[in-house]
Amino acid sequence: MAATIIKLFMLLGVALLASVCVSSTSDHENPFIFKSNRFQSLYENENGRIRLLQRFDKRSKIFENLQNYRILEYKFKPRTLLLPQYNEADFILVVLNGKAILTVLNSNDRNSFNLEVGDTIKLPAGTIAYLANRDDNEDLRVLDLDIPVNRPGQLQSFLLSGTQNQPSFLSGFSKNILEASFNTNYEEIEEVLLEEQEQDPQHRRILTDRRQEINKEDVIVKVSKEQIEELGRNAKTSSKKSVSSKSEPFNLRSRSPIYSNKFGKFFEITPEKNPQLQDLNIFVNSVEIKEGSLLLPNYNSRAIVIVTVNEGKGDIELVGQRNENQEEKREENDKEEEQKEEEISKQVQRYRARLSPGDVFVIPAGHPYAINASSELNLIGFGINAENNQRNFLAGEEDNVISQIQRPVKEIVFPGSSKEIDRLLKNQKESYFANAQPLQRE
């Protein structure tokens, strides 16, 4: 019976115990896991931080199609504000923890939104926006998937309020252009928009009432409770019922989970359900796995999924080819080495990693995987190439693709009879999620 199980999984490239190669890899050797130390700090002060994950295509050649996708992480202390800026990238923003006020500027108006955990919104490239943590006690954590529009993988932000390291983009214009544009002299423009100069006491007092002193290096600043209240005035709340808005935030839990039982829940918003995701061809999902439970083995037919561990701990096992943890270093004329790598690439290998909050892992299309939760686990995923993607489960009572193999093929491929195989497949009474502890049989 054990041999039947092994060959059944090998048929679909899920040889978790295949004899050709069953060795596990360390996190350093595993190209699919990005531990939190692979984030680079772009900005940090006492009010918060902004971190950027290492480029995917710099880690392994298997991620060449991800060269234009970047992950940004924001963490803000209570009652703080990320100053206005825009980026030359499309953003998909997801609130991981806390409560926020997001203000988006348009040519003729602005829209403010109260955001909570699970709220998601797309910000098109070039959109000027600012984000505030409206809570008095709780930190705000936000995750961004960024798709640059100019140079692949290169993010460039433009600040309205300049710092010592990066001046305001307005200061890049010549004096003549600025004077003609604002119809005033340059000294006034410099004083009001570009930098603070000596001002009369009355002017200084008015300015202080409206805006506290800010260090020139600050991008994330502390604000008062009154300022938070003013920012939140007329702010809209994301819809908990609909995900079809073209410009307003939607919540990942606004609809029933696509998979659910007592062991876990799987929420997903696809481009077919939300117009904000259509032109980017991306889906967004949130997976909750109970402690001691397992997301059953499955794979995506087309989508490459970038997953961030929001809360909890667990393990992931992903099945790939043996050479996927190697960088491309051979010379083009080294035929012998090329043939050797082609032979190695046919070998199946299990890639295993322990998951902790802040970790990121990538699931390439066609790569089977399973996730085991050692504590209550919450994952946020972005699926690239979402259109026509199909998620195929390899175990479970429902939607089990292996169970669809016809009887004559079963009898040809496997040493067991078709009845034995059918009986084995029906042992698992759960679907999608199950108890992570296997049954002990004599």
Image (cartoon, rainbow, N blue to C red):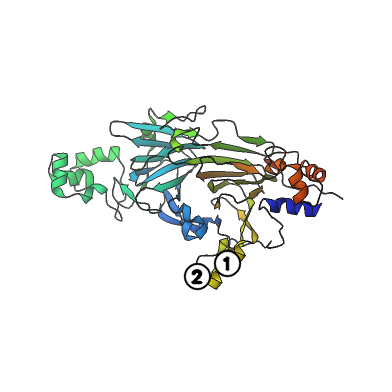
For the point 17% across and 43% down, which residue is it? 200
Mark 1: which amino acid?
Answer: Glu
Q: Is residue 174 or residue 324 the one in the foreground?
A: 324
In terms of secondary structure, where does tag 1 sit?
helix
Mark 2: which amino acid?
Answer: Arg
For the point 23% across and 47% down, which residue is it? 170
Which residue reaches farthest right?
A: 442
Q: Is residue 394 or residue 420 the one in the foreground?
A: 420
For the point 31% across and 56% down, which residue is it? 165
Mark-to-mark CA distance, 2 and 1: 10 Å
Which disc number belongs to residue 330? 2
Q: From this viewpoint, is residue 159 visible? A: yes
Q: Is residue 339 or residue 44 the one in the foreground?
A: 339
Q: Is residue 357 or residue 202 the one in the foreground?
A: 357
Choose top left, top right, bottom left or bottom right for residue 350: bottom right
Mark 2 crowd level (few <14, some 14–19, many ≥20, 10 Å Cα): few
Percent coordinates x, y for residue 390 in the rendering: 58, 41
- Horizontal side of 201 relative to 357 (left or right) equals left
Which disc number belongs to residue 341? 1
Q: Are marks 2 and 1 in contact (CB under 8 Å)?
A: yes
Percent coordinates x, y for residue 258 in the rendering: 61, 34
Mark sitting earlier along the chain (2/1): 2
Mark 1 crowd level (few <14, some 14–19, many ≥20, 10 Å Cα): some
In terms of secondary structure, where does tag 2 sit?
loop
